[in-house]
Image: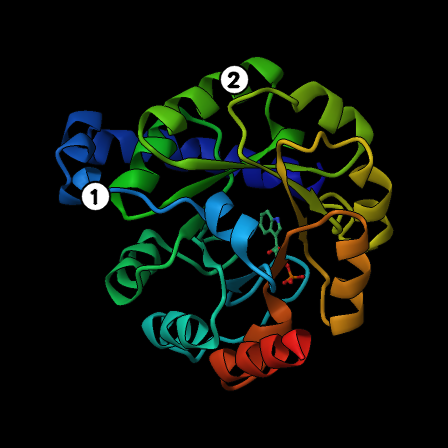
């Protein structure tokens, strides 16, 4: 079994258990369900830098990135750096994140927050809203076209933006539909962990202009961003490059300053 299949199998069990502990009506009565979401796509369209900074403690490809920081300090630092939005990993088993991280981040900043999760059930979309997310991630590699359609419709009905992630042409062709706000190209193959920015470059011409193009993973230089902008990208999702430092906010700030000068 490849890592992605393992993650999804574990996620299925986790969500089935979770549904019994906190029922859908309970989630739907959460205070944050009433909050008006902020659109990340709208912020990216107006931004020069396009940086979406991620809170990520560890990953299957890197066992320790940063285990010692406080999530609220990290996102406040990112906000001060002037990022467009933040991504918060909520998977526990493989990424060391949690829904607590998301709700704590929500309490600390007003910027758009992406719930970075392996979504395989509508329950997790209501959960994303209930814990303060503005955006959900849908990963084409683990969903059927019918699921992408149903999940994105539910997200839109809750006021959430949808970032659809693809890794190849086949996933992209399967997924294109009007409910999506942003098309993310993951430069990291989630099955092999190989990273190549060429993935973003090759797929860019196949993404219709109505979607905001986001390039994800393995981005660590200003040159890479300048290059990707030439291919029409307006969003850049960066995790490790900031999180591996002692002060991710300061790293993001220095990066954005350099980018804008
Ligand atoms: O740390 P990086 O290489 O900058 O990558 C960030 C982000 O793109 C990556 O964490 C990611 C992209 N898609 C995902 C799907 C699930 C989990 C994680 C991810």
User: In the displayed structure, does residue 47 sit left or right of residue 2?
Assistant: left
Ligand 1 shows up in the quarter that is: bottom right
118 or 171, which is in the foreground?
A: 171
The CA distance from mark 1 to mark 2 is 24 Å
If the image is split into quadrants, where does the C terminus sit? bottom right
127 or 202, which is in the foreground?
A: 202
Label 2 Cα crowd, 10 Å radius (few <14 / some 14-19 / many 20+): some
Coordinates of residue 78 in the picture (x, y in percent): 45, 72
Coordinates of residue 214 in the picture (x, y in percent): 65, 47
Contact check, label 1 and label 2, Cβ < 8 Å: no
**Residue at 15% from the left image edge and 40% from the top image edge:** 30
Coordinates of residue 151 in the picture (x, y in percent): 45, 23
Label 1 Cα crowd, 10 Å radius (few <14 / some 14-19 / many 20+): few
Coordinates of residue 218 in the picture (x, y in percent): 73, 62
**Residue at 27% from the left image edge and 56% from the top image edge:** 103
Asked whether mark 1 lies closer than 8 Å to ligand 1, one says no
Is residue 198 depicted above or below 254 in this figure?
above
């Amino acid at each position: 079994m490849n890592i992605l299949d393992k993650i999804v199998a574990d996620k299925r069990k986790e969500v089935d258990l979770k549904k019994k502990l906190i029922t859908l009506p309970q989630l739907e009565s959460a205070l944050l369900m009433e909050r008006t979401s902020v659109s990340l796509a709208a912020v990216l369209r107006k931004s020069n830098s396009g940086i979406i900074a991620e809170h990520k403690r560890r990953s299957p490809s890197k066992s320790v990135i940063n285990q010692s920081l406080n999530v609220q300090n990290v996102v406040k630092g990112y906000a001060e750096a002037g990022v467009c939005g933040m991504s918060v990993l909520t998977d526990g088993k493989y990424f060391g994140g949690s829904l607590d991280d998301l709700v704590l981040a929500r309490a600390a900043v007003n910027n758009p927050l992406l719930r970075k999760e392996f979504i395989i059930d509508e329950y997790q979309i209501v959960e994303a809203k209930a814990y303060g997310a503005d955006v959900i991630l849908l990963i084409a590699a683990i969903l059927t076209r019918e699921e992408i359609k149903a999940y994105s419709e539910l997200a839109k009905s809750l006021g959430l933006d949808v970032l659809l992630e693809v890794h190849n042409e086949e996933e992209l062709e399967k997924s294109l539909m009007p409910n999506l706000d942003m098309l993310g190209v993951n430069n990291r193959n989630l099955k092999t962990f190989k990273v190549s920015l060429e993935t973003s470059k090759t797929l860019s011409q196949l993404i219709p202009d109505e979607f905001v193009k986001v390039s994800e993973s393995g981005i660590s230089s200003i040159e890479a961003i300048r290059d990707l902008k030439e291919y029409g990208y307006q969003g850049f999702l960066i995790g490790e490059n900031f999180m591996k430092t002692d002060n991710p906010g300061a790293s993001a700030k220095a990066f954005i300053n350099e980018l804008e000068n």
